Image (cartoon, rainbow, N blue to C red):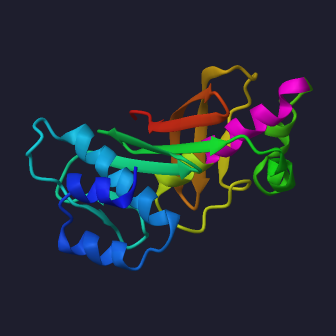
Amino acid sequence: EDESFFFRQLVLHDSEAAELSIIKGRRRLEWLASRHLVHLMVSDEPDWDRIPMLKDEHGKPHLNDHELFVSFSHSYDFVAVILGRMTVGIDIQKFVPKITALERKFMREEESRSLAGPTRLEHLHIYWGAKEALYKCYGRRKLDFRQHILVEPFSYQEKGSTTGIINKNGFHKTYEVFFEKRDNYFLVHALETQA
């Protein structure tokens, strides 16, 4: 889709139009696509008024005056969106072999020990996606992927789940993490577990 498609579908609120006005290039399409998907997910009727998606003081998106939590991600030609009644986070990643260059920055020793064999790179993408999704659940900056986030080690499969834990300065929460491989992409989402 191009921008004109989204402008025919969306009526932007003033705060959204102001945010979009400073975005350049391909990021504009990603921004518009994510808002379009959220609108489709929360509206019951085609002419239903849109709930504006705003950002809080930490840059975390939220639906204005609405009880649903929202998260979105983009990678190349795809945008992914998730909504939930509990804190949620989502990540979509295209398979890129150069992810190994980042491994030491985000993988803990116990996580790295679970990587093995011919699916090592795919497994690494899921760990990265899980940590991105958990970061979005946390919703604040200055969260170290190695120090503050643990993804319980798991065996690689194309669809499955594990547990994620965020532990930083008295903040301690556990999340269910679900993942799947779709063609050349990895889709991961995290949901806060009930206390």
Horizontal placement of 105 versus 36: left or right?
right
User: Is residue 59 depicted above or below 149 in this figure?
Assistant: below
Q: Nearer the viewer, residue 77 or 130?
A: 77
Horizontal placement of 176 versus 160: left or right?
left
Question: Could you tell me if residue 134 is visible in this image?
Answer: no
Residue at 57% across, 62% down:
169
Q: Position of residue 73 (x, y in %)?
A: 50, 50
Magenta stretch containing residue 53, yes or no? no
Q: Quadrant of residue 160?
A: top right
Residue at 83% across, 50% down:
98
Q: Nearer the viewer, residue 166 or 7?
A: 7
Count numbered badges in the picture: 0
Q: Position of residue 149 (x, y in %)?
A: 65, 49
Q: Quadrant of residue 85?
A: top left
Q: Position of residue 82 (x, y in %)?
A: 39, 40
Residue at 19% across, 51% down:
66
Q: Name the chief secondary structure element in magenta.
A: helix
Residue at 29% across, 78% down:
18
Span shown in magenta? 118-131
Q: Quadrant of residue 112?
A: top right
User: Of all residues shown, which one is farthest toward the right?
Assistant: 117
Horizontal placement of 160 versus 190: left or right?
right
Q: Position of residue 74 (x, y in %)?
A: 52, 51
Horizontal placement of 175 versus 98: left or right?
left
User: Is residue 103 depicted above or below 187 in this figure?
Assistant: below
